[in-house]
Amino acid sequence: MTKVPEMFGSMVFNDKVMQERLPKATYKALKKTVENGEPLDEGVANVVANAMKDWAVELGCTHFTHWFQPMTGVTAEKHDSFIQPFGDSVIMEFSGKELIKGEPDASSFPSGGIRATFEARGYTTWDPTSPAFVRDGSLYIPTAFCSYTGEVLDKKTPLLRSMERLSGEAVKVLHLLGKTDVKRVATTVGPEQEYFLVDKDLYDQRVDLKLCGRTLFGAMAPKGQELEDHYFGSIKTRVAAYMKELDEELWKLGILAKTKHNEVAPAQHELAPIFSTSNIATDHNELTMEIMQKVAERHNLVCLLHEKPFKGVNGSGKHNNWSISTNTGENLLSPGKHPETNYQFQLFLAAIVKAVDEYQDLLRITVASAGNDHRLGANEAPPAIISMYLGDDLDALVRSIINGNDYESHGKERMHTGVDVLADFKKDNSDRNRTSPFAFTGNKFEFRALGSALNIACPNYMLNTMVAEELSQFYEALKGADNMEAAVKALVRETLTAHQRIIFNGDNYSDEWVEEAERRGLYNLKSLPEALSHFMDEKNVNLFVKNNIISEDELHARYEIDLETYCKQLNIEALTMVDMARKNITPAVSLFVRELTDTALSKKALSDSISVNVELNLINSLTVQLEQFAALTDELESEIRAAAAIDDNQEKAFAYRNKVFAKMEALREVGDEMETHTAADYWPYPSYTELLFGV
């Protein structure tokens, strides 16, 4: 068996490989580019490209690809071989120009109207901060992506810009506080990934899973998650084999897969990595999702990453553990032993509180999707109302600052086990409020509202940008202070007082919180159309334009793309429901009714004294339901046509949400009821019992 340390990163052109294969001068030049953002000379790029090619060919590669993250929400790749003609033969070559720039056709990627059709070409450009890697016989080069005319058309570029912006503003503030040895600040992320595993043979029989990623019909199984026996339970043999191979594939690519376990719902699981810098964490999470699905195929399984593949059991999210660290190794979100005198921590905390309060709509927008609308507020994920949880100790500190009182730490409460052989231990003061969307968890914030399929670049570039903006304002307020400590204390108190409404340590699921949040003036944006209606608000446009993250046109393009994607997803789901209803469910139930009718007639033919009440009752109830089902199918189709005819994307999105989706829910209710009364041999699709307990 290969040892994990030997396996880890074996398919990555990482720092160790670069030191071994690059001339010292080339290695130093590349490191300056990676660490300090200095431009890369084409001569250096040629040397790096040749070393990359030699390394990749030794690992069996014949092709290379610029790997990028367009606005589709998934990754993209176009593979070119290393071969170049050489007389009657070929040689394997790879130039610095090919490393630095690619030219994929961009015509079919979402652009939100930002470019004309005839300007189809796009450009990919190497991101040297994220290591190249080998997969499936190709050298993968992480890149950014822009249009022919220079507009940003990907998820990565705004993230890289936001990281630079936050670093610059944080360093300026730290220098005011005397930390002049700090040169760079990096945001780090550890995204926990939830997913479902189902048997592939069953999946192949469900057109809704194949086309939509979720079941559009399906009555609840007799057992769900109510016994709470799946969560952290013993992992089934088949799933354990899948998880073992998944870990190994991820480790080869340098992905820090750390934790694996069963989640709450049957057939649901989770993988959590150790944190890394935001751009690498984003690349790794996209890779993780792709590899999850590919490894599943080898075990005759399908990995479902939809936020809500099964109605009636918990859906899947992705917790985004976000923090800020300096190049000197200091975590800026660590309170230390005495947070009451840790004014640096208080200042950065105040900036985040202010950012989350002022841009709560943006944070909600970052997690808005057709799939995530099913989760948020459904007692399985945080609600759509954005708020912050600080924990008892930190909340007490904030209250003492606001009120001018002395701070008294609760201390770490000792947990007594009551068993001599078990050690007592101290309870974490930042113990998590599982209902909070944005919770402080010791030395980081956990943004818990993300959906499982989401590209984490979006929430992180928005979070980075809004915090950078607040730090910029703090710098301007503090830079001329005669007494820096007094100025910081005053600014922290003023900020926390003005923005305390966003802090809530209670039960986010309660009806009382909904009423309280409304009194506080917090948004309750329950669906994507409601959230997106605030995307182009002036303050949001100004935030991104002022900080040079994306232009107003690029922001508007993202707004249009998100609306278009939402409408298209609901349209596909609705059309799939109509297809399933007419072609499979209605004929199947009709056939079962006919069987019941034949049975009743056969019994009556034997003797008038034989009761046929069971058959007659079923025939009557199913016939009534079939009529309702057919009528609702027609009504759904009519609503689809009406919504599709609307030109304005915002209006169209509301039509799909309020009218099409409402009809889908009504149709499903009748369909699921018919499933419970139809013989299993007649029902055309695998049941929830088979799907959730078939692995």
Image (tube, rainbow, N blue to C red):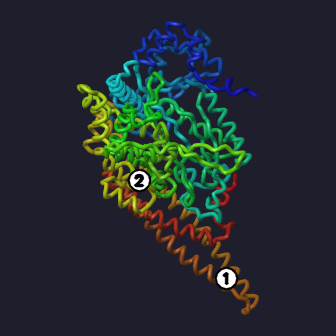
Give the left or right position of residue 299, taking residue 215 as reference.
Answer: right
**What is the CA distance from the residue labelled 2 to the residue labelled 1?**
46 Å
Image coordinates of residue 203 in percent, x first then y, are: 63, 52
Q: Quadrant of residue 516?
A: bottom left
What percent of the width, then of the height, locates residue 532?
Answer: 35, 49
Q: Residue at x 40, y 21 (%)?
A: 182
Foreground of the two, 653 or 530:
530
Residue in the picture at 51% in, 60% down? 577
Give the vertical position of 392 relative to 326 (above or below). below
Q: Name the secondary structure under disc 1.
A: helix
Q: Return the residue nearer the eye: 446 or 496.
A: 496
Q: For the residue labelled by badge 2, is the local secondary structure a helix, a strand or a loop?
A: loop
Residue linked to disc 1: 614
The image position of residue 442, as x and y in percent, is 49, 39
Amino acid marked by disc 2? Ala
Disc 2 residue crowd, few under 14, some 14–19, many 20+, Cα 10 Å: many
Residue closer to the observer: 624 or 485: 485
Q: Kindly tell me whether residue 426 is visible in this rendering.
A: yes
Q: Which mark is residue 7?
A: none
Q: Amino acid at mark 1?
A: Val
Quadrant location, the N terminus = top right
Residue 540 position within the rendered picture, expressed as x and y whole percent measured from the top left: 29, 41
Q: Would you say 92 lies left or right of 332 here? A: right
Q: Who's the residue at 53% across and 33% down the image?
A: 275
Q: Badge 1: few (under 14), some or many (20 or more) residues near its Cα, within 10 Å?
A: few
Q: Residues at badges 2 and 1 in contact (C-beta under 8 Å)?
A: no
Rendered image quadrant of residue 465: top left
* Name of the residue lying farthest toward the bottom: 609
Q: Which residue is mark 2?
A: 384
Q: Using the rendered image of the protein, determine whether residue 560 is visible from the camera's viewpoint.
A: no
